[in-house]
């Protein structure tokens, strides 16, 4: 039997160079098609030009989150200038926007907010000698006073809302916010009230009778915001 010539057979089935090029091109084309399918499946699309919206069908909504009440509340404008106690010039007796108290009754110190330290109780029927923040003239409507404060030590403190006309001031709401004695974490206190006419609103705390010397409250924020009503 005649032995096969393997060299001759192999030579006969050699693939021409041009065929190899076409085969490689076909593989690349298949990979490109697969890549396009994957990209489309994951929602990516053509990149838009700068400053213009992507073309329709190139964006996909991934997540929708509801803005909760707290976030909406924090977004309201604070009508009390200086209510965050963020600006306190060197040598000034109080932060910007805060009218300082009679130093014989209480003093103010820097803290995570503002620390007020009392030496004696204060008269509940006048605000002239007390720490106070003014919101100016506000139109009719419903408002909310809110504070975050660390509980007092040595006695209770009342935070009142006053309407001022000239030198006279009267409580808008005689149901004052009361900061009870107790050390610990800051708590939120709030009170809503309604104005029936344009009123200059002033917020002022005072120590209640029976408070011991060197009793203190840390005011972290004082916020007054309009919540409803038309002016």
Image: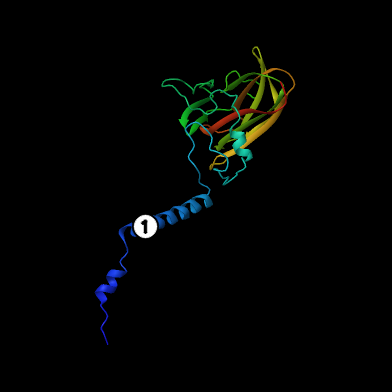
- Residue 80 appears in the figure: yes
Q: For residue 128, which quarter of the picture? A: top right
152 lies left or right of 227: left
Label tally: 1
Name the residue carrying label 1. 24
SS of the residue under disc 1:
helix
Name the colouring of the figure.
rainbow
Residue closest to the eye, 83 or 126: 83
User: Measured from the top left, where is residue 3 in percent x and y?
Assistant: 25, 83
172 lies left or right of 115: right
Q: Residue at x 49, y 37 (%)?
A: 48
Q: For residue 143, which quarter of the picture? A: top right
**Residue at the bottom extreme, as displayed:** 1
**Residue at the front extreme, as displayed:** 2
> The N terminus appears in which quarter of the rendering?
bottom left
User: Measured from the top left, where is residue 223 in percent x and y?
Assistant: 59, 29
**Residue at the top extreme, as displayed:** 166
User: Measured from the top left, where is residue 231 in percent x and y?
Assistant: 71, 20
Circle 1: is it few (<14), some (14-19), or many (20+) Cα within 10 Å?
few
Q: Residue at x 29, y 73 (%)?
A: 9
User: Measured from the top left, where is residue 76 in percent x and y?
Assistant: 61, 30
96 lies left or right of 9: right
Q: Residue at x 49, y 53 (%)?
A: 38
Residue closest to the eye, 213 or 170: 170
- Residue 209 appears in the figure: no
């Amino acid at each position: 039997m005649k032995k096969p010539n393997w060299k001759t057979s192999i030579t006969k089935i050699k693939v021409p160079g041009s065929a190899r090029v076409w085969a490689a091109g076909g593989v690349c084309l298949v990979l490109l098609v697969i890549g396009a399918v994957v990209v489309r499946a994951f929602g990516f699309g053509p990149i838009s030009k700068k400053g213009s919206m992507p073309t329709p069908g190139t964006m996909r909504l991934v997540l929708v989150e509801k803005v909760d009440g707290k976030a909406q509340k924090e977004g309201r404008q604070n009508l009390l200038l200086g209510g965050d106690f963020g600006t306190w010039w060197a040598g000034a007796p109080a932060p910007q926007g805060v009218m300082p108290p009679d130093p014989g009754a209480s003093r103010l110190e820097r803290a995570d907010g503002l620390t007020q330290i009392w030496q004696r109780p204060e008269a509940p029927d006048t605000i002239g000698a007390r720490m106070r923040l003014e919101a100016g003239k506000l139109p009719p409507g419903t408002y909310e006073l809110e504070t975050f404060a660390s509980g007092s030590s040595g006695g209770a403190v009342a935070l009142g809302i006053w309407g001022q006309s000239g030198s006279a001031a009267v409580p808008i709401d005689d149901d004052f916010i009361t900061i009870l004695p107790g050390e610990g974490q800051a708590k939120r206190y709030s009170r809503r009230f309604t104005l029936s006419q344009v009123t200059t609103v002033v917020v002022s705390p005072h120590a209640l009778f029976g408070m011991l010397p060197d009793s203190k409250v840390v005011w972290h924020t004082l916020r007054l915001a309009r919540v409803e009503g038309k002016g």
